[in-house]
Amino acid sequence: MTAAVLTLNAGSSSLKLALFPAAGDAPLATGQADRIGPDGTLRIAAAGGAALPVPPGDLTSHAGALAAALAGFRAAFPDLDLRAVGHRVVHGGTDYAAPVTVTDAILADLARLEPFAPLHQPHNLAGIRAAMAAFPQVPQVACFDTAFHRAHPWVHDTFALPRDYYDRGVRRYGFHGLSYDYIAGALPRIVPEVALGRVVVAHLGNGASICAIHEGRSVASSMGFSALDGLAMGTRCGQLDPGVMLYLMEQEGMAPAAISDLLYRRSGLLGLSGLSNDMRTLEAAGSPEAEQAIAYFTTRIRHQLGAMAAVLGGIDAVVFTGGIGENSARVRAEVCETTGWMGIAVDPARNARNATVISPDGAPVPVLVVPTNEELVIARAARAAARS
Ligand code: ADP
């Protein structure tokens, strides 16, 4: 028997899967379905990345894509014994501060949070429903992007709105919690002397945020009520004066759906560059607009780095993670260009090769590049549920 747990990350038109063994950090196999619908594609791969044969299947729905991927996994591991399925769920509201084994009542509870994350939560829950139908006997474990931030002090959890809005759930939830959870768990191995100190982690991918961590726990996040706040992102605007939204509604007559499209899909690096949401494309382009988009991106990261230093009363380590944080030497160098006064600097040669420690020898603040692994955090939660 190959005992395993499955992790699922269901987006609007995508499904990422990973099959983990009962112990160990490396997946047995991974899968990714994209453009779920009439033009859906599915790729599955064995450990190490070699492609596995994809059985014919219906890629017009998440359930169909899941079934096709699983058929491929079963063909590769005929004695597969699936013990639990772990799901990435963007929003756990105010109550879910840890992974939870999903029941019908919990699923209904999570569905009530859909208005808080309308672009993500419904798809996450569709993934859970599809997996429940496929494996009715197997525990389904929801792992929340908000959970790591649930212990924020009140001042970092609220907006300065009348108090009843807080009670109604209008709060600074923070996101990317699975990534921060992984990094916080990995630091004792990498920098044991400062892992429990004041750490600032920059998760820079298509979505991007910064998190202040003290003693392994999140204190503040640049993301707030929605995944729009804070840093500029691939297509999202980041921090915006709310007066801009009033102006768009009142003076330009924009409806909520049009504003949502503008702020989530047409802004950020894409909107500023007029070219692409992809950092690699912008770095290669060299056009004035692409250069300005990168400059805005790195300036806002620095802005938040300073803010988090003030929140924590100093910084003992900085970590870059996410697709851009792990791979873009240019972005890291530009972020750290003016932070030498805080003891934060990068060594150009180490930075260029994405070394784990990119600060110079003897620097007061270690600056690190740590690849994140959200799937492993989900797999660990699924394993724990399977054992209980
Ligand atoms: P997601 O948030 O969708 O998981 P990722 O964490 O994979 O996204 O990050 C995607 C981003 O990482 C893209 O902007 C991509 O251009 C960027 N990226 C990946 N590799 C590099 C690289 N070598 N140099 C610069 N940017 C990179």
Image: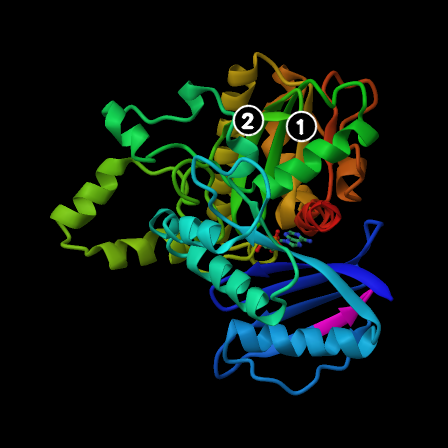
Snapshot quadrant of residue 191: top right
Asked if residue 87 is positioned above or below residue 292 in the image, the reply reads: below
> In the image, is the residue at mark 1 within 8 Å of ligand 1 by its beta carbon?
no
- Position of residue 337 measured from the top left corner of the image (x, y, whole percent): 62, 29
Farthest-out residue, right: 1
Mark 1 and mark 2 in contact? Answer it, CB < 8 Å. Answer: yes
Task: Identify the residue under disc 1.
Answer: 318
- Position of residue 159 measured from the top left corner of the image (x, y, whole percent): 33, 27
Q: Identify which amino acid the numbered label 2 is placed on.
A: Leu
Task: Identify the residue under disc 2.
Answer: 305
Q: Which mark sits nearer the N-terminus, 1 or 2?
A: 2
Cα separation between marks 1 and 2:
9 Å
Find out whether residue 47 is within the magenta segment. yes
Q: Residue at x 70, y 47 (%)?
A: 373
Q: Residue at x 47, y 39 (%)?
A: 231
Q: Residue at x 38, y 48 (%)?
A: 113
Label drawn at residue 88: none
Asked if residue 113 is positioned above or below residue 186 in the image, the reply reads: below
Q: Identify which amino acid the numbered label 1 is placed on.
A: Val
Write down the region rendered in magenta. Answer: 44-49
Q: Mark yes or no: residue 161 visible.
A: no
Find out whether residue 357 is within the magenta segment. no
Q: Residue at x 31, y 54 (%)?
A: 260
